[in-house]
Image (cartoon, grey):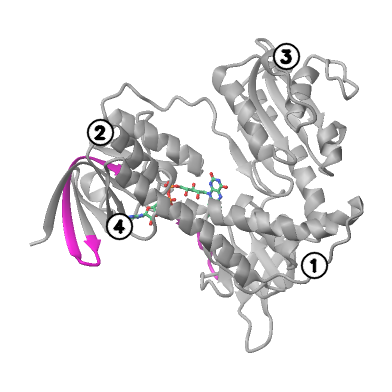
């Protein structure tokens, strides 16, 4: 007989959606069991946000050597010990993942390591190393996340053909790295390895890198990518690859401009998107709706079409971002605890940790126009910013999107140093329905990057101080 347990709520998946949900449920006094099959902290903490940002930071440190000479500092890079770098990265991951279980338990929750499958709308079967455990629950929260998409001819072996997981675990620097996919994951890693010394080619099927981002933002990134020696091929299709034989080098065959081209490759990173983990959970059998792309949609209260089952995080749909999942986790917990909560966020910020960073929130200029907003734009370049010049960070701009009729800030695109931090101020403005004057009239400390937000806000009405204003 399998062991039988009873809890008020079961959360399946301990990524940033599931573990945050379990912690919040604990805070609200709900008896909760968090089930995880592989690693506490999910993709984000183990093989996503955190390890990628650690390597991005390390590669930036290595690259400083090249930039320092401009400021009269003569440095010599003796070499890159990638194995040591990985050790440092793993230490960070370990610290963070260790904290997750402690926080869940510290808030009164329980954790069970094993693979879960639903057997009804109120029960789950969990395969653990010690056998099968049956769990009955009033509510089930699905937070099983997503995994990398594979493409034909490029099966992941994590030695030659790498997913992002393999690319974050390399202990030897590939001399030639081909990155298939010019989205945010592909570009973050392409820039990282280029800075560490790999010769990188990015192969993107669409007409521009970062499809979906505004062309003026992508243009800034394009300049930097070129400066780093990365070859970015757009409207290009990866067709096949050949792993290295003996001491020889592997290759990737692509099609670009109607011609076939063979690229040398010691490793190929395939970063063409992610797919929700909705199979093998027994969802169809109990009537939970699954979308064509495999997502399990939920409403503003995070409920699926089956009343006792909730869906959050990457599994619930785009944007597949950690903070979006965490917010959904908190709201789901509050709904389960009987609070009148719902997810009514106006905007979700998104950051691309390239160099320079790119950050967006709310509507882009193009989206706002498509929605019929009478758009006013305020733009301010980093090159006119004291802080930008004094830190040698002159690439980029802040662009605010404002509803001309109401003066309300509806979105922003920022490309440049520390865009990831700057976007928080505009996210707050969008969330609060702030007027652009609220940003323009707030005193910003000098000399700082956020002054670019204040100046862009002033530029909306032709009042920016450190650039010549265009007629409005
Ligand atoms: P996940 O983190 O995928 O966690 C789901 C968990 O469920 C996993 O631990 C899995 O083992 C478990 N699970 C699945 N099925 C079962 C089952 N049947 N039983 C038990 N457990 C199960 N997002 C950002 O916001 N910022 C970034 O900078 C960023 N960088 C990224 C970089 C990379 C390289 C990658 C790959 C992703 C990045 N992301 C980033 C995306 C982010 O990692 C995801 O959006 C986030 O992890 C999703 O959280 P989640 O909780 O929905 O799912």
Residues drawn in magenta: 127-153
Residue in the image at 71% along x and 70% along y: 80
Q: Label 1, on which residue?
A: 77
Structural crowding at the residue carrying mark 1, measured as other residues with C-alpha within 10 Å and reported as few (<14), some (14–19) or many (≥20): few
Q: Label 3, on which residue?
A: 441
Lower position in the chain sequence, tag 3 or tag 2: 2
Lower position in the chain sequence, tag 3 or tag 1: 1
Tag nearer the camera, 4 or 1: 1
Residue in the image at 32% along x and 41% along y: 22
User: Are the two marked residues, 3 and 4, in contact with CB atoms closer than 8 angstroms?
Assistant: no
Q: Looking at the picture, tell me which residue is in the foreground, 108 or 135.
A: 108
Lower position in the chain sequence, tag 2 or tag 4: 2
Tag nearer the camera, 3 or 4: 3
Q: Residue furthest top?
A: 405
- The total of numbered circles placed on residues is 4
User: Is residue 90 rendered to the left or right of residue 380?
Assistant: left
Structural crowding at the residue carrying mark 3, measured as other residues with C-alpha within 10 Å and reported as few (<14), some (14–19) or many (≥20): few
Q: Quadrant of residue 166?
A: bottom right
Please tell me whether the stretch drawn in magenta is mainly helix, strand or loop.
strand
The vertical placement of 344 against 247, above or below, is above
Q: Label 2, on which residue?
A: 29
Structural crowding at the residue carrying mark 4, measured as other residues with C-alpha within 10 Å and reported as few (<14), some (14–19) or many (≥20): few
Mark 1 to mark 2: distance in Å? 54 Å
- Residue 107, how many percent across, how many down? 31, 40
Mark 3 to mark 2: distance in Å? 43 Å
**Circle 2 — which element?**
loop
Q: Label 4, on which residue?
A: 280
Residue in the image at 69% along x and 63% along y: 193
């Amino acid at each position: 007989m399998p062991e039988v347990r009873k809890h008020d709520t079961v959360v399946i998946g301990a990524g940033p959606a599931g573990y945050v949900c379990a912690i919040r449920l604990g805070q609200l006094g709900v008896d909760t069991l968090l089930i995880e099959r592989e690693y506490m902290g999910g993709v984000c903490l183990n093989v996503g946000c955190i390890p990628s940002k650690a390597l991005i930071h390390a590669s930036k440190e290595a690259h400083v050597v090249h930039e320092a000479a401009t400021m009269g500092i003569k440095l010599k890079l003796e070499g890159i010990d990638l194995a040591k770098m990985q050790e440092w990265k793993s230490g960070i991951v370990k610290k963070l993942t260790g904290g997750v279980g402690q926080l869940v338990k510290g808030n009164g929750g329980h954790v069970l390591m094993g693979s879960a499958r639903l057997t009804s709308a109120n029960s789950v079967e969990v395969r653990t190393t010690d056998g099968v455990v049956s769990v009955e629950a009033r509510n089930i929260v699905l937070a099983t996340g997503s995994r990398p998409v594979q493409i034909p001819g490029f099966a992941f072996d994590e030695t030659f053909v790498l997913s992002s997981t393999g690319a974050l675990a390399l202990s030897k620097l590939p001399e030639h790295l081909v990155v298939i996919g010019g989205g945010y994951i592909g570009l973050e890693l392409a820039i990282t390895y280029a800075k560490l010394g790999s010769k990188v080619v990015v192969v993107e099927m669409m007409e521009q890198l970062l499809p979906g981002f505004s062309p003026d933002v992508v243009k800034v990134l394009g300049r930097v990518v070129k400066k780093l020696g990365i070859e970015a091929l757009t409207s290009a299709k990866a067709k096949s690859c050949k792993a290295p034989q003996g001491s020889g080098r592997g290759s990737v065959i692509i099609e670009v401009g109607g011609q076939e081209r063979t690229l040398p490759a010691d490793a190929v990173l395939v970063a063409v998107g992610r797919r929700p983990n909705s199979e093998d959970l027994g969802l169809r059998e109990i009537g939970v709706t699954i979308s064509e792309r495999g997502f399990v949609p939920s409403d503003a209260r995070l409920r699926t079409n089956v009343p006792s089952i909730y869906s959050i995080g990457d599994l619930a749909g785009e944007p597949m971002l950690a903070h979006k999942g965490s917010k959904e986790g908190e709201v789901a917990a509050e709904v389960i605890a009987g609070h009148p909560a719902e997810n009514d966020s106006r905007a979700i910020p998104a950051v691309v940790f390239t160099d320079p960073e790119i950050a967006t929130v709310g509507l882009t200029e193009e989206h706002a126009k498509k929605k019929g907003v009478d758009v006013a734009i305020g733009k301010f370049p980093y090159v006119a910013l004291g802080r930008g010049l004094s830190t040698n960070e002159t690439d980029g701009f802040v662009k605010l999107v404002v509803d001309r009729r109401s003066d309300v800030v509806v979105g922003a695109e920022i490309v440049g140093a520390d865009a990831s931090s700057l976007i928080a101020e505009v996210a707050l403005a969008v969330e609060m329905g702030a007027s652009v004057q609220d940003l323009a009239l707030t005193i910003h400390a000098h000399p700082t990057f956020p002054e670019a937000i204040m100046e862009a806000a002033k530029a909306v009405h032709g009042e920016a101080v450190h650039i010549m204003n265009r007629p409005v």
